[in-house]
Amino acid sequence: MPNTFSYLSQVYFDELDGLGLLHHTRYLLHLERAQQNFFEHLLGVDDFNVERDEDIYVVVHSLTARFRQPVSNPGPLAINYTIQKIRGGGVTMGYTVSCPEAGTVFCEGERTVCKLSAETHQPAPWSEPFRVAMESFQAAS
């Protein structure tokens, strides 16, 4: 089983749509929060600082989402990331969004991000320490 990074993200009442469900666009916000925490974990830092941590400067290349069951109440969501493939300046991660208590999977898919240079906004390779951290995380499965 692959090594998994887990993050608890809180759904608030104001995120529910007129049907009382978490709108599909809100899942992306929770994925983004979890990815930021995952990268901070890999970097060994406690905050988001693109000037200090060049590997946080990424853009989403692709995203797939399979919605399995709607989120219909405020409360915690478990966002789980696994590293599937590491490239020179990109990484593909699998994810699940689920209920932390019952384990019900609400959404699952893949997300690929690519690192950019903060100066040129062009694709750039991962720093060696970050690449090693991702490879170590992936190998720990």
Image (cartoon, rainbow, N blue to C red):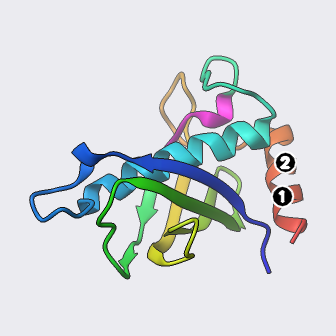
Side of 16 relative to 28 (left or right): left
Residue 100 percent across, percent down from the top left: 57, 65
State the residue in front, 61 or 101.
101
Residue 123 point in image, percent of width and height? 55, 43
- Residues 29 and 130: in front is 29
Q: What kind of element bears circle 2?
A: helix
Give yes or no for residue 39 being in the magenta stretch: no
Amino acid identity at mark 1? Phe
Where 128 sits versus 52, above or below?
below
Residues at marks 2 and 1, CA–CA distance in whole angstroms: 6 Å
Q: Over which residues does the magenta segment extend?
A: 54-59
Q: Identify the residue shown where x is 56% and y is 48%.
A: 34
Q: Considering only vertical position in the picture, is 40 above or below 134?
A: above
For label 2, count other residues whose C-alpha is less than 10 Å away and answer few (under 14), some (14-19) or many (20+). Answer: some
Please give the residue where the numbered disc 2 appears in the rendered image. 133
Dots 2, 1 in contact, CB < 8 A: yes
- Name which residue lies at 62% across and 21% down: 49
Q: Position of residue 129 (x, y in %)?
A: 86, 39
**In the foreground, 136 or 29:** 29
Measuring from the top left, give residue 70's x and y in whole percent: 31, 73
Which quadrant does the C terminus fall into?
bottom right
Q: Which mark is residue 27?
A: none
Q: Residues within 10 Å of mark 1 (few under 14, many from 20)?
A: some
Residue 124 in sight in this render: no
Q: Amino acid at mark 2?
A: Ala
Q: Is residue 64 above or below residue 74?
A: below
Q: Which residue is mark 1?
A: 137
Report the side of 25 relative to 51 (left or right).
left
| Residue at horizontal 63 percent and vertical 41 percent from the top | 37
Q: Residue at x 58, y 68 (%)?
A: 101
